[in-house]
Amino acid sequence: MFLAQYSCPICQKVLSFIEKSYRCENNHSFDQAKEGYVNLLPVQHKHSKDPGDNKAMVNARRAFLDNGFYQPLADELQRLYQQYADLAQPVFDAGCGEGFYTHQYANNTNTVYGIDIAKNAVRIAAKKYKDCQFSVGTLSQLPFADNFFAWINSIYAPILEKEFTRVLASNGYLVTVTPAKNHLIELKHLIYRDAKQHDTNKLPIENLTLVEEKEVNYVMEFNKGTDIINLLSMTPFAFKATEKLLDDLKSRKSFTCQADFLIRLYQNKT
Ligand SMILES: C[S@@+](CC[C@H](N)C(=O)[O-])C[C@H]1O[C@@H](n2cnc3c(N)ncnc32)[C@H](O)[C@@H]1O
Ligand SMILES: [Zn+2]
């Protein structure tokens, strides 16, 4: 890991790191927090007091991911990275959450960056994964120079094509993970009478070339109610669950549910 290279989120000039703070030539300055991350989200880019996922969602996701339920997805991402990437070039995890996938890219030669708008998540990530560079920021105005990254990772997070393409180097790759048809379908059936499959038709990226598309599908076996509740808390349909259903799930000793991910790998062939 090398020193982080950021550009100023206000004026886009290079930020220099001096005495625990990042500063540009126009004197915009951003202090490094004690956990090692830097908050690069200027108030004018902040549309709510506490943007992004809330503390309960962050904690649920951290517990769920740490129990390894999505490790097969992380392993497939690593296979693609090893197969396609120049392993010494910078990597960016866009909407990195608690850094579970981010840190798996770190090796002895690259620098791995994670950005998320949720400060709670970034704080946890920075505390746990010292081999990555984390910052609070918005994906719609990335604090990086043009063409900086050889690999961008976007997992269940907003895909902002214009900004991602700006910071992606020529021949660099963008990997996106979105839900495939049957993702969590059994959980959805408990909530919606006619649970719909995910629609996977739309290709969200237009100006990069799709080089590979694959699905990762497997069955997760749960034997603890807390794991099921954590999973539910990570979904956009959690708020639809009734108290009765929550009580039922909490007391379950077994539940099986599919994980079904769609991975798309794009290359910047310009
Ligand atoms: C479903 S979570 C996925 C987190 C992580 N990639 C994972 O899979 O564990 C989506 C993340 O995107 C972040 N996010 C949403 N909008 C964002 C934005 N405009 N800029 C940066 N992060 C954003 C949220 O705070 C949240 O952590
Ligand atoms: Zn500046």
Image (cartoon, rainbow, N blue to C red):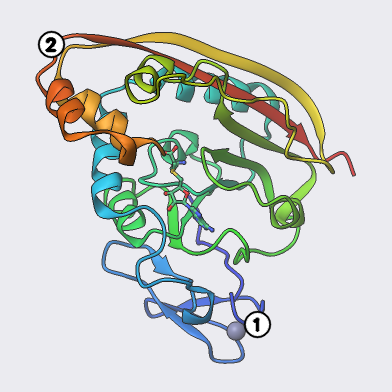
Ligand 2 within 8 angstroms of badge 1 C-beta:
yes
How busy is the neighbourhood of tag 2: few (under 14 within 10 Å), some, or many (20 plus)? few
**Relative to residue 149, is residue 189 depicted above or below?**
above
What residue lies at 40% left-to-right and 20% top-to-bottom?
Answer: 193
Q: Nearer the viewer, residue 69 or 158?
A: 158
Query: What percent of the width, then of the height, locates residue 82?
Result: 60, 24
What residue lies at 76% left-to-right and 57% top-to-bottom?
Answer: 166
Q: CA distance from mark 1 to mark 2?
A: 54 Å
- In which quadrant of this rendering is ligand 2 seen? bottom right
The amino acid on which the numbered mark 2 sits, given as a three-letter code, is Lys
Q: Nearer the viewer, residue 83 or 267?
A: 267
In the picture of the structure, the residue carrying the numbered disc 1 is 11
Left or right: residue 239 compared with residue 258: left
Query: What percent of the width, then of the height, locates residue 208?
Result: 82, 39
What residue lies at 67% left-to-right and 27% top-to-bottom?
Answer: 264
In the picture of the structure, the residue carrying the numbered disc 2 is 253
